[in-house]
Amino acid sequence: MAKQKLTLSEKLNIIRAGVLGANDGIIGGAGVILGVTGATTNNTVIFVAGIAEMFAVAFSMASGEFVSVSSQKDTEKAVVTQAKTLLATQPAVIHDEIAAHYEARGAEPKLAARVADDLMVKDALGHYVQIKYGFIVEKYLSPAHALISSFIASVSGGIWPLLAVVVLPEGWKVVGTVVATLWALFLTGWLSAWSGHAPKTPAILRNVITGLITMAFTYWIGTLLK
Amino acid sequence: MEMEISQRINILRAIVMGANDGIISIAGVVFGVYGASMNAWAIFLAGLTATIAGTFSMATGEYVSVNSQLDSERAAKATQETALANHFAQETAFLTQHYQADGISEANAQLLAQQTMQKDALNETLHARYGIDEGQMISPVEAAIASMVAFPIGAILPMVGMTLVPAAYRIVTTLILVIFALILTGYFSAVYGNTPKKPVILRNVGMGLLTMGVTYLVGLLMVV
């Protein structure tokens, strides 16, 4: 696998994926902790449930990413193999597909054919695969990388509500967890907007409000179970 | 795996991924709490709140993520519209260079840029500058609903296994239910992803077992 330098947009995509993983960890963790706190005052139960949830969510995130990136890699490899065979046996088909693609984008048929001539000389496989299947050859994501980074992202989000509920004194546990969670959600909302070049206020508001609703709802369910 | 089909498949994949997430994370929670030798009530409480919190975080995560992607695309589109209105020649020159970098000769690249800019300048430059193509997005609401429905469906199996089955058979039943469920979601995600089924199923089941094993160990450590 060729190591290529990441472009800025790819780096930002990685940040955004990390932010979303962290977000999942935060909201899930806060929801469980508040839900259990609503139902019981037993600190051990709260603590055990919080820890178990943090690890479980991190693993499920990481394994989901791992499985999906692995199968994406398999798919892309299969597509590339197929395209290589086609290129070796029927290059005219590939030439015409490339030409048709540029024709659809507005080029006159003659120009499109000349453009395809040019592209057949330089990296025909890469152009064909990108046009037809929308991904760049040899730029596979690494499953191991996806696994580790989403695990870290999830834990780095989930740890905040857990720390708040463990560290804070009795009367402050619920308020402190809510505040820690909202603060973390504010940060991840800001980061995700920043990394996506998007307006910050709507991203932050969406994030904080959905977090508030989750915590309120799970706490309420918890009190019903009391 | 053509672009048009991929939109509908995205929804189906969101469902499968949501269910998978529900199975693995709730199995992890109930095994962790069980490992800490908590009673059935604590297992039920942790499992249920984790299911509700997970459902919310899946749904809101999808919603927020797709929305922030749409925000980015809108911002890029606005920037590009201004650029086209004020500096059309520069944008054409940029596009020509972009084509040349792909391997198209200078003469052809110039002509191509002129002709494609005539057809759909916005889309062409968006594609070249940001890698964005219009009409490829799924709606945030659809994605959110898909995961929100799927997560608790997946979560039900480990919950039922761990709380309703008599204590003696609890672990075995839950393990069997979870493995069975992970085989199913692995199978369907391979079908929708159009990939060989066996490696996907094996990876999925393997990761599920690993999750349950580790959270159980973490639970055990908390007792000591």
Image (tube, grey):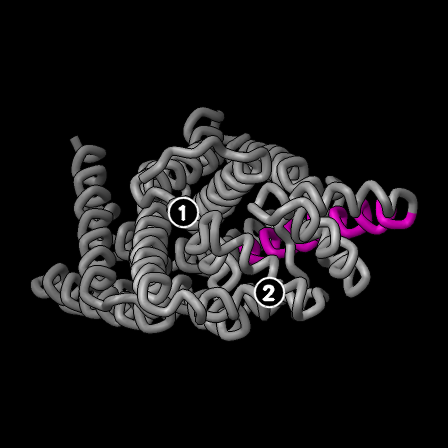
Q: Which of A100 and A48 is in front in this view?
A: A100
Label 2 chain ID: A
* Residue in front for this viewpoint, B178 or A21: A21
The residue at the point 29 percent across, 64 percent down is B159
Query: In the rendered image of this protein, does residue B137 appear above or below residue A145?
Result: below
- Provide the residue designation for mark 2: A113
Q: Please name the residue that numbered disc 1 is placed on.
A: A40
Crowding at mark 1 (Cα within 10 Å: few <14, some 14-19, many 20+): some
Which amino acid is tagged 1? Thr
For the residue labelled by badge 2, is the local secondary structure a helix, a strand or a loop? helix
Same chain under badges 1 and 2? The reply is: yes
Is A185 left or right of A173, judged from the image as shown? right
Which residue is at the far right? Answer: B86
Disc 1 versus disc 2: distance between alpha carbons?
A: 72 Å
The quarter of the image holding the C terminus of chain A is bottom left
In the rendered image, is residue B55 in sight? no
Residue at screen point 48% across, 70% down: B2
- As for residue B69 lying within the magenta part, the answer is yes
Give the percent coordinates (x, y) of residue A32: 43, 48
Front-most of B63 and B175? B63
Residue type pointed to by label 2: Ala
Q: Element at badge 1?
A: loop
Residue count near mark 2 (Cα–Cα under 10 Å), binned few <14, some 14–19, many ≥20? many
Range of magenta residues: B60-85
Q: In this view, does B219 lie above or below B51?
A: above
Residue B187: horizontal and vertical position, in percent? 26, 70
Above or below, A70 relative to A92:
above
| Rendered image quadrant of residue B129 | top right
Work out whether A28 lies above or below B27: above
Q: Quadrant of the N terminus of chain A?
A: top left
> Mark 1 vs mark 2: which is more N-terminal?
1
Residue A76 in the magenta stretch? The answer is no
